[in-house]
Amino acid sequence: MNDHEKISAGGEARSGIASRPPRPGETGRQDMLLRYLGAVAAASAEQAEARQRPATGDPGVAGGAVRVQGRPAGQRPPRVPAESLAPLLVRDVMDVPAASMHDDLPYRQIARLLAREGVGAIPVVDAHDHVVGVVSESDLLAKVAFEASGHRPGPIGRLRERRLHGKARGESAADLMTAPAITVLPGATVAEAAWLAALSRLKRLPVADHDGRLVGVVRREALLRALIRDDEGIREEVESVVVAVCSPAERTTVQVKVRDGVVDLTGRAPAATAARLVAEIEAAVEDVVEVNDHLVTG
């Protein structure tokens, strides 16, 4: 192994070592994030498949549930067939009322509003409550950074740099906001909203009606909780699989525990029954991270 290979190998080894011990509860949060990512990936796969199918003619099916004023470049809102729509909708998990600001709000009052609400971004609305943009902490920080640097783009400076400079000189929400805004309809499914939030890298999505008026805000944490069932719900479904797979005598000897999506099976069961039980749980029960088979066979 030459010196270059040794350095590369050492770097890879160091990258796999945690820089600090995990904080209390961090492992659980990581498991939840992995489950959330899995749910979003599954929703995206379903929506990608749905886009390959013929449209049903139902405006609520062919992408009508997601209203995107500002859409990630090259992306289209998902089309989901009616039979696969999740029962839980954005209106069921959104925050109402939603904090907002008018487009003429001055810079310093924007900072105070963000601090008072304890959020990183707030929708901007016009006189009729139509969502016209979003102002975030990063917009305010960019303004401060440009003003402090004293940098001025030259006449042949890059277009993006000149736009940032012009935006940083603004004093109102209309000048500083990111526009157009990415919004979602209250009738969109939680899976659709999670797909859009993940694609747009947003922690909060403004919820607007068909006329573009702000009706609420949905947080990524709320989407996470809605997409991922709690352990009790998973346990109940696993126990229903136990009832379906095991004989009446075997059911009383199998115990089920679930924590952070990990299923632990303990007790006693014939080898064939135990193998079938694990396979059925892994195949049929959603949100299961792992199945630990501790069953005594014989």
Image: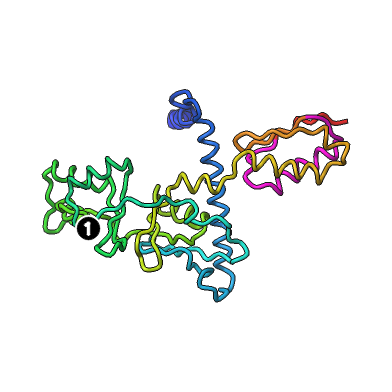
Residue 202 relative to residue 173: left or right: right
Residue 279 relative to residue 200: left or right: right
The quarter of the displayed image where residue 175 is located? bottom left
| Residue depicted at x 29% and y 58% | 133
The answer to whether residue 83 is above or below residue 9 is: below
Residue 58 relative to residue 257: left or right: left
User: Is the image coloured rainbow, by chain, by secondary structure, or in one colour?
Assistant: rainbow
Instruction: Characterize the local packing of mark 1: few (<14), some (14-19) or many (20 or more) Cα atoms within 10 angstroms.
Output: many
Q: Which residues are magenta?
A: 267-291
User: In the image as oriented, which residue stretches furthest toward the top?
Assistant: 21
Residue 150 x/y as whole percent: 11, 44
The answer to whether residue 201 is above or below residue 14 is: below
Closer to the camera, 162 or 177?
Answer: 177
Residue 156 x/y as whole percent: 14, 58
Closer to the camera, 98 or 45?
Answer: 98
Count of marks overlaid on the render = 1
Check residue 245 for magenta coloring: no
Identify the image quadrant of the C terminus: top right
User: In the image as oriented, which residue stretches furthest toward the bottom?
Assistant: 57
Residue 208 x/y as whole percent: 38, 61
| Residue depicted at x 36% and y 68% | 211
Residue 145 x/y as whole percent: 18, 42
Check residue 278 for magenta coloring: yes
Which residue type carries mark 1? Asp
Q: Secondary structure at mark 1?
A: loop
Q: Which residue is mark 1?
A: 103
| Residue depicted at x 49% and y 67% | 63
